[in-house]
Image (spheres, rainbow, N blue to C red):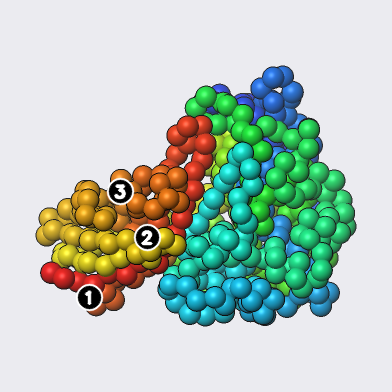
Amino acid sequence: MTDLPSLDQVADRIEDLMTRHRLPSVALAIARGDRVEARGFGLADLRGRAATGATPYLLASVTKPIVATLCVVLAERGLADLDEPLADRLPWLDAERPGRRGRPTARQALTHTAGFGRYWDFAYDEAPPGIERAVQRYGVLIHEPGTRFEYANLGYGLLEPWLEAATGHPLAELLDRYLFRPLGLESGAFGPGAGGAEAAVPYTRERHVPYPTIHTSHPAASMAWMSAADLARFGTAHTDRSEVLAPGSAAAVRTPGLEEAPERYGLGWNVRHPGGVEVLAHGGDMCGVGASLAVLPQLGVSVAAVVNRTGSFEHARTACEILLEGLVGRIGSESDPVAVALPEGEWSGRAETPFGPVPLLVGASGDGELWVEVAGERTRARAEAEESYDVMIAAEAQLPTPDALRAGPWLELALDVGGDRLTGSARAVKHGESGDRVGNCLTHWCELERVR
């Protein structure tokens, strides 16, 4: 087996990565057994504070494998039942909403097979109303639980109140008691601003403007903090030589929620096999942060990289790939989705929003030209790749509802084709970072019938 490089050996390549992409800092770490090597490059705070391997960073969606591991640990101790419907402890989940009917379980939320659509929200001046309000408005079951993979922050967001209802303790306390302290993760923290004064400052992509405290209604999907050293150390809990999880639990973690899904996703991990080597991986990408964690269970290796700038997940992943170059190749998705055109025709229907239905008209010509009409206003559209649906149509078109007007002037229709009927998601999205802020993605139930 090829030896892993030392961080000194890859320093020039990491510094070149930072220079080419204007990254304020990169912190990375390699863990093998009890040995952890970590180092920071650049500035955690552009006013002059250097990044180190011990600097806490916001982890964005790398929060998910951390919360998933906690759920597995609690299940081993008989404190939580992963196959229990979430609504058994959260009865407000049973309220009638547009879309499919079903009672997703905690395990389905952990594997992104609960049926919820794509969603995220961020707030900066004050905290949003919370996960119950978000689910009341946008917790639409686009798919029947257990039938489809779709990456869903709302599913993970629901694990926080579910765990508190099951154990009587808040998620931050559970993480500290059952994960951070037992594993010696001294920098581990959870919640808005929980990284403390020594944490890396999250910066915008273009102007390097610092973000204020970031809030979201789904912190269990997005709001853990950890240093690169501790993140790599956490990863070793999922190696074959670790005794943190019982063998059955370790196997369950690596078992995809749906074997036939385009993305093999277990309990909090993307499960991949580049070059025949098993890799558990997860990335994070949101306001002012990019993060990447990769674990090679059979080789007992874990690597982590974190960056304090928006739009930097790919650079964090590249840093991990540099560290693993002698062992595996690319640790990203093994296959990329392909854009599929909508069949020729015209469909009429609506998006079901919290403020009432919004009329929609969608058309495709024989030469592949697409258009979308929202509440009577027509806009040219294009087909985009989408792994969880038959077709995806994107247009600079505004859903005329108060929440969508704040979310941004972009509409994505992610749809399944069933004869003369289209069903799926109508997403109001703000792409990019206009106004030096990342925006929201709000999903609504959508259905249309062929009229021509």
Image location of residue 83, percent across then percent down:
66, 80
Circles 1 and 2: CB atoms closer than 8 Å: no
**Res. 265 image quadrant:** bottom right
Circles 1 and 3: CB atoms closer than 8 Å: no
Q: As rendered, which of 127 and 319 lies closer to the eye?
A: 127
Would you name the residue on which mark 3 appears?
397
Apparent side of residue 373 relative to residue 191 in the rendered image (left or right)? left
Distance from Cα at disc 1 to Cα at disc 2: 18 Å
Question: For mark 1, does the 10 Å Cα neighbourhood hold few (<14), some (14 to 19), or many (20 or more) residues?
Answer: few
At label 2, the amino acid type is: Ala
Distance from Cα at disc 3 to Cα at disc 2: 11 Å
Asked if residue 10 is positioned above or below residue 332 in the image, the reply reads above
Label 3: which secondary element: loop
Label 2: which secondary element: strand
At label 3, the amino acid type is: Ala
Q: As rendered, which of 245 and 214 lies closer to the eye?
A: 214
Would you name the residue on which mark 1 appears?
420
At label 1, the amino acid type is: Asp
- Mark toward the start of the polypeptide (1 vs 3): 3
> Of tags 1 and 2, which is closer to the observer?
2
- Mark toward the start of the polypeptide (3 vs 2): 3
